[in-house]
Image: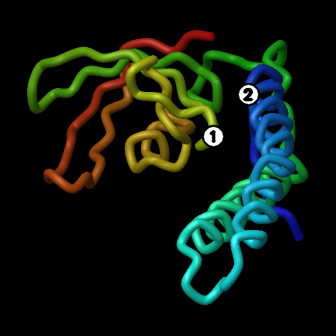
Amino acid sequence: MAKVNYITEAGLRKLRSELDALKAERPVISAQIAEARDKGDLSENAEYDAAKEAQGMLEMRIAKLEATIAGARIIDESKLGTDSIQMLNRVTIKNMNLGKTVEYTIVSENEANLKEGKLSIGTPIAQALIGKKRGDVVEVQVPSGILKLEVLDISI
């Protein structure tokens, strides 16, 4: 059974686009393999080995994307609320250890990008925040120790 991946419509479009681009690379790699094969002895042919390895990596990535897309469930953003934290909410939290305030949007693992403020649902911080309300304080075990976070705001 495929793993369910909750994702935005934009995130799913991005995955499909990446899958199409990878599938378009198949003929290129097949041509490289054929060209290397034509050069003779395959036992000592580094070009052939490299092309076969590239083909294996490509097929592995295609299979992973296909599985992710097969298990994708689009989140209906119109049904999101701000009473408690859930996927796709933008949350403002205060790190009480440092007195620093940060904002994150909680997204699927495939859409995570810390530079854009997109925090994966699979992270310890996101896991601790899910279901919390404004004013709640949570303690999160992270590699550097225990973070004490206060939920300041929840928005869409």
Image quarter in which the N terminus is found: bottom right
Tell which of 19 and 40 is nearer to you: 40
Q: What residue appears at the point 38 percent right and 42 percent down from the top-left corner? A: 125
Q: Earlier in the sequence, mark 1 or mark 2?
A: 2
Residue 14 locus on image (x, y percent): 75, 27
**Mark 1 → mark 2, Cα distance in angstroms:** 8 Å
Left/right placement of residue 46 relative to residue 26 reads: left
Image: 100 above or below 35:
above
Tell which of 148 and 103 is nearer to you: 103
Instruction: Classify mark 1: helix, strand or loop.
Output: helix
Left/right placement of residue 6 relative to residue 105 reads: right
Residue 59 locus on image (x, y percent): 76, 61
Q: What residue appears at the point 14 percent right and 53 percent down from the top-left corner? A: 145
Kind of residue at disc 1: Asn
Mark 2 Cα within 10 Å, few/some/many (few <14, many 20+)? some
Tell which of 74 and 90 is nearer to you: 74
Name the quadrant containing residue 63.
Answer: bottom right
Instruction: Classify mark 2: helix, strand or loop.
Output: helix
Image: 149 above or below 153:
below
Left/right placement of residue 14 relative to residue 104 reads: right
Residue 128 locus on image (x, y percent): 43, 45
**Number of callouts:** 2
Residue 134 locus on image (x, y percent): 44, 19
The color scheme shown is rainbow
Q: What residue appears at the point 49 percent right and 25 percent down from the top-left corner? A: 118
Q: Residue furthest bottom?
A: 43
Image: 26 above or below 126:
below
Kind of residue at disc 2: Gly
CB within 8 Å, label 1 to label 2: yes
Name the quadrant containing residue 106.
Answer: top right
Which dot marks residue 110?
1
- Identify residue for label 2: 11
